[in-house]
Image: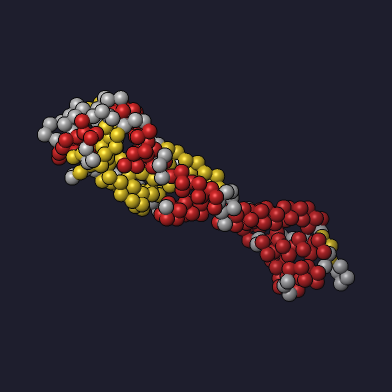
């Protein structure tokens, strides 16, 4: 370790404050009053600083204390270090007190467009200085974003496997049937999965978890597999159903959105699809103060 690294490693904030106070006041006694410490303690602190630096920083006499040429060169450096320390510590305090900071979360579109806006409004009122970024992306991308650290929090359905993430449940969502307005099943108050799956189905693309759950229900409930039209977005599913292409199974979270697209929503009677919605965090990763505050609001909502 070279001398500069040794000095940086052994020098303390207490020593720097003592050095600057003596330099600014020109007196050990006045520096002690400013720092609220005893003169022997201050003398020991300066002696250690000089030992670490390799030479004298003050020229002492019975009447005065003055900076040596080396001490004069070091003074602005020490003052800057103390200012940076104070600023950095203030920044840290503001982060913990939620006076500043940022938070990025990801949520599946069905949650992002239904439950999340109210939570975000509440969060913004309580913590107006926190910068929020929301990514509304499909379930698989939400979990991937949490796993990679691109977002701190993710909100979506619980998958069949949890790899590298922790899950905190919020509530359970039961899938509903959506139908064209003039469909024969639209006259019913409830629709069974068996009756629904006798009709042409509009579903999310193969490979998505939602599609896997629908396929499992088909295997359990349908005498034969229905004709299926694939789509990549739930809004497309709703628009296709409203236009009469077929029927669909979607999360109940989407009911208002589906109705706004012109589809009719009905609960599923008997066996259906029920999945937990919750918060995903990266395993063994501590949450920031803004993220902890968001989790508390999500749990209360």
Residue occupying image coordinates x 31% and y 42%? 252
> Is residue 9 found left or right of 44 in the rendered image?
left
What x and y, as percent, mark residue 27? 82, 67
Callout count:
0
Q: In this view, does 29 lie above or below 156?
A: below
**Residue 132 seen in the current view:** yes
Q: In this view, does 213 lie above or below 63?
A: above
**Residue 142 seen in the current view:** no
What x and y, as percent, mark residue 73? 78, 53
Depth order, front residue of 299/34: 299
> Is residue 274 found left or right of 233 in the rendered image?
left
What x and y, as percent, mark residue 241? 29, 28
Tell me which corner region of the image, top left, top right, bottom left or bottom right, holds residue 184. top left
Residue occupying image coordinates x 45% and y 55%? 296
Depth order, front residue of 240/77: 240
Residue occupying image coordinates x 39% and y 38%? 109
Tell me which corner region of the image, top left, top right, bottom left or bottom right, holds residue 273. top left
Viewport quadrant of the N terminus:
bottom right
Residue projecting furthest to the left? 223
Residue occupying image coordinates x 34% and y 39%? 255
> Is residue 77 found left or right of 225 in the rendered image?
right
Residue projecting furthest to the front? 187
Residue projecting furthest to the right? 63
Depth order, front residue of 260/210: 260
What x and y, as percent, mark residue 30? 81, 69
């Amino acid at each position: 370790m070279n001398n500069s690294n040794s000095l940086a490693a052994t020098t303390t904030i207490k020593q720097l404050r003592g050095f600057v106070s003596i330099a600014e006041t020109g007196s050990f006694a006045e520096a002690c009053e400013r720092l609220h410490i005893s003169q022997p303690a201050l003398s020991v602190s300066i002696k250690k600083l000089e030992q670490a630096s390799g030479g004298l920083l003050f020229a002492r006499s019975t009447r005065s204390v003055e900076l040596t040429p080396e001490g004069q060169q070091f003074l602005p450096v020490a003052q800057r270090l103390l200012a940076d320390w104070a600023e950095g510590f203030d920044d840290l305090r503001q982060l913990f007190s939620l006076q500043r900071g940022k938070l990025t979360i990801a949520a599946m579109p069905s949650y992002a467009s239904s439950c999340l806006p109210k939570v975000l409004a509440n969060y913004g009122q309580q913590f107006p200085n926190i910068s929020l970024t929301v990514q509304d992306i499909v379930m698989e991308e939400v979990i991937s974003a949490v796993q990679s650290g691109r977002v701190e929090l993710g909100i979506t359905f619980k998958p069949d496997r949890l790899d590298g993430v922790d899950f905190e449940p919020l509530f359970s969502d039961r899938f509903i049937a959506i139908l064209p307005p003039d469909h024969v099943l639209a006259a019913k108050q409830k629709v069974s999965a068996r009756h629904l799956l006798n009709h042409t189905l509009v579903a999310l693309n193969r490979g998505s978890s939602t599609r896997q759950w629908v396929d499992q229900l088909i295997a359990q409930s349908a005498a034969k597999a229905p004709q299926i039209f694939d789509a990549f977005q739930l809004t497309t599913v709703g628009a296709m159903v409203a236009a009469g292409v077929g029927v669909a199974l979607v999360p109940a979270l989407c009911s208002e959105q589906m109705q706004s697209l012109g589809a009719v929503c009905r609960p599923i009677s008997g066996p259906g699809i029920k999945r937990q919605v919750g918060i995903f965090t990266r395993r063994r990763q501590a949450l920031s103060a803004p993220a902890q505050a968001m989790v508390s609001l999500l749990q209360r909502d």
